[in-house]
Image (cartoon, rainbow, N blue to C red):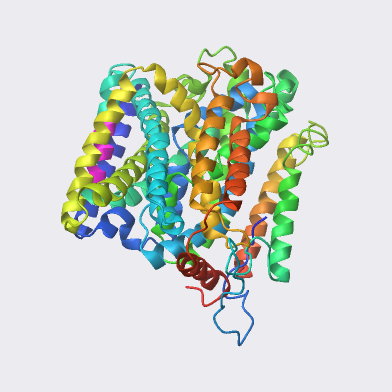
């Protein structure tokens, strides 16, 4: 049997498994928004663990990380800092978000922030940030999926068709089973992608170099420039190291598809277990990625697109069945992020827009069906964004990684009682200024200040750092002179945090 | 800096539910959560932040930015970072076991 037939067949076997899981999840679904949108707040440790790690690691972790090691060397091992930080944030902040969600029935990030700051403007701005800065990930993941299927089939399945097939499958099981279907498929995806990366990398290391240790020794001899900072192209400067750490930890955790996972846990202890143990999976996934990228730099040094190093090595040096299994793992990595973003955007649009402003008093069944219709709309938008090129997308993609980071001061104000309260005006101005600074420091054109301040990344410091510093400064300053949330609201919400952390607990 | 403390270890035996303790114009109504309240809480926060500082500039771009000596079969910087990442995860697990 030809290699492309084996590789493509294994990907389709994987897709059939996800469809079956979606159908089974549909049988368990009750007509209830919390069940459809939040898994009924009953997600246990194993399911939540695998959905969090599978969602965090996208197609980028599978394909892009190898490309980063290939191009910039050991500097990408900085990934360990942000994955460990994700654990710490989940432990400290995620458990508080869970407690507030359970106590006050929050479903979206905007629910929590609008409640504390007593502001519909906060709800609208947070909903816009939630959707705008994550919808582009649909495009990124869908393009990754189309590319994987196209590569696996030797270009027999064109990019547009591969993207369409995989988007339809993801949307299909999401519509059928809601978040339960997403979680169950993420369990398969989380296990599959982890095994695939490790098995593929070790296979290549032994076949091409005689083992991982020999691979490292060869890198020292042939490409020592890959083993120190800031790397061959000078990318991993101190400012980039710090900035990427902040953007890819806080910036990802505060995106709605990750925050919604905190709400869905069965108890606070589960969230703390997640915080303490998810870095093990998240960080160790980059160990085989380093073998792929660094080994690839020795074996295939002139690759035009570094992100293709893993599939290129597999097609040249691995048997067809292994290549197929690993590309199915890459598909899993992309789909697990794609379905979660589709779900979170659907949740925000259903809850924060439709239920709040269009039909506030409808039945639970009505909202579930509206959610399904919204998924079809998101599917169409995601597909068009994936196969067409729009100039404005380039700008938005540049900003998207740090967009959700702008929610940080507002969320800290809710989850961490302190002597000084943040106010509605403070967080609105803070988010507004933070987004403006993000634009000015990350986008080089069109940007009237680009040449003046040296965008992108003025003074070698990542734009995410500039934006969050400005956001905090403005939030604190404006909050000093504007009206705080009412005593009743602060007492109710901070009182719940106090009880959870220092009082009766769960 | 944020507190890593949590129930039930942070509460003294016999303490009732916490009552609002501060009330002023624009002020909070509960004791700040930005600093730990127990010894174990301080230990966890300081250990985590201290170790985290070792994988950030200037340490990582300075003293740790070298290939030699090899550790455990890998270049120095790689192993240095790996060991501290594992230690950071160890702090989180320690905090979990201490019910912080």
Q: Is residue B46 magenta?
A: no
User: In the image shown, does A25 or A497 lie closer to the viewer?
Assistant: A497
Quarter occupied by the N terminus of chain A? top left
Q: Is residue A400 left or right of residue A457?
A: left
Residue in view at x 69 percent, y 19 percent:
A232
For residue A274, say whether it is visible: no
Q: How many marks?
A: 0
From this view, report whether residue A469 is shown above or below residue A263.
Answer: above
User: In the image shown, does B26 or A316 lie closer to the viewer?
Assistant: B26
Residue A380 image offset from top left, x and y in percent: 24, 30
For residue B66, say whether it is visible: yes
Point out the residue furthest to the bottom here: B14
From this view, report whether residue A187 is shown above or below residue A321.
Answer: below
Q: Is residue A169 magenta?
A: yes
Q: Main secondary structure of the magenta part?
A: helix
Q: Is residue A197 left or right of residue B65?
A: left
Residue A94 image offset from top left, x and y in percent: 51, 57
User: In the image shown, does A62 or B27 lie closer to the viewer?
Assistant: B27
Residue A103 image offset from top left, x and y in percent: 40, 68
Q: Quadrant of residue A67?
A: top right
Residue in view at x 45 percent, y 27 percent:
A397
Q: Quadrant of residue A55?
A: top left
Residue in view at x 35 percent, y 22 percent:
A3
Residue A499 image offset from top left, x and y in percent: 52, 73
User: In the image shown, does A506 or B91 lie closer to the viewer?
Assistant: A506
Residue in view at x 63 percent, y 69 percent:
B31
Q: Magenta residues, as a range?
A: A165-175
């Amino acid at each position: 049997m030809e290699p492309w037939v084996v590789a493509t067949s294994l990907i389709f076997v994987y897709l059939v498994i996800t469809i079956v899981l979606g159908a089974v999840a549909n049988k368990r679904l009750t007509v209830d928004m919390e069940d459809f949108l939040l898994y009924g707040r009953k997600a246990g440790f194993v399911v939540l663990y695998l959905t969090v790690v599978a969602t965090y690691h996208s197609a980028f972790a599978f394909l892009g990380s190898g490309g980063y090691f290939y191009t910039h060397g050991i500097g990408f091992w900085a990934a360990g800092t942000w994955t460990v930080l994700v654990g710490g944030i989940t432990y400290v902040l995620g458990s508080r978000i869970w407690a507030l969600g359970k106590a006050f029935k929050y479903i979206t990030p905007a629910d929590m922030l609008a409640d504390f700051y007593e502001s519909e403007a906060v709800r609208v701005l947070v909903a816009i940030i939630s959707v705008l800065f994550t919808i582009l990930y649909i495009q990124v993941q869908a393009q990754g999926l189309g590319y994987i299927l196209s590569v696996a089939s030797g270009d027999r399945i064109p990019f547009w068709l591969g993207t369409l097939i995989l988007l339809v499958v993801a949307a299909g099981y999401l519509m059928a089973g809601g978040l339960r279907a997403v979680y169950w498929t993420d369990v398969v995806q989380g296990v599959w992608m982890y095994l695939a990366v490790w098995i593929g990398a070790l296979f290549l290391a032994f076949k091409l170099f005689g083992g991982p240790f020999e691979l490292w020794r060869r890198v020292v001899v042939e490409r020592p420039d890959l083993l120190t900072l800031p790397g061959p192209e000078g990318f991993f400067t101190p400012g980039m190291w710090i900035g990427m750490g902040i953007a890819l930890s806080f910036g990802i955790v505060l995106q709605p598809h990750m925050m919604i996972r905190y709400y869905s846990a069965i108890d606070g202890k589960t969230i703390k277990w997640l915080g303490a143990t998810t870095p093990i999976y998240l960080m160790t996934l980059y160990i085989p990625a380093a073998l792929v990228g660094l080994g690839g730099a020795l074996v295939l040094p002139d690759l035009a697109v570094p992100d293709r190093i893993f599939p290129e090595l597999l097609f040249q040096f691995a048997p067809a069945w292994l290549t197929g299994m690993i590309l199915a793992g890459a598909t899993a990595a992309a789909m697990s992020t794609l379905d979660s973003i589709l779900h979170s955007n659907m949740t925000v649009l259903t809850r924060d827009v439709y239920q709040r402003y269009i039909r506030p008093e409808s039945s639970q069944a009505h909202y579930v069906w509206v959610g399904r219709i919204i998924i079809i709309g998101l599917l169409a938008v995601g597909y068009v964004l994936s196969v067409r090129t729009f100039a404005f997308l380039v700008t938005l993609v540049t900003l998207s990684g740090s967009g959700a980071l702008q929610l940080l001061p507002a969320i800290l104000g809710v989850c961490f009682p302190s002597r000084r309260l943040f106010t509605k005006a403070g967080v609105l101005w803070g988010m507004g200024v933070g987004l403006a600074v993000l634009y000015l420091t990350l986008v080089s054109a069109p940007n009237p200040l680009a040449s003046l301040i040296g965008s992108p990344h003025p003074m070698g410091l990542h734009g995410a750092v500039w934006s969050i510093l400005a956001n905090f400064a403005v939030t604190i300053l404006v909050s000093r002179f504007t009206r705080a949330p009412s005593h009743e609201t602060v007492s109710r919400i901070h009182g719940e945090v106090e009880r959870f952390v220092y009082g009766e607990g769960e | 800096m944020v507190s890593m403390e949590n129930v039930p270890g942070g509460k003294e035996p016999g303490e009732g539910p916490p009552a609002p303790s501060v009330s002023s114009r624009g002020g909070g109504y509960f004791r700040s959560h930005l600093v730990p309240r127990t010894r174990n809480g301080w230990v966890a926060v300081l250990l985590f932040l201290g170790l985290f500082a070792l994988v950030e500039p200037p340490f990582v771009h300075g003293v740790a930015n070298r290939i030699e000596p090899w550790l455990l079969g890998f270049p120095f910087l790689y192993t240095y970072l790996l060991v501290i990442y594992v230690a950071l995860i160890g702090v989180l697990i320690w905090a979990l076991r201490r019910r912080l």
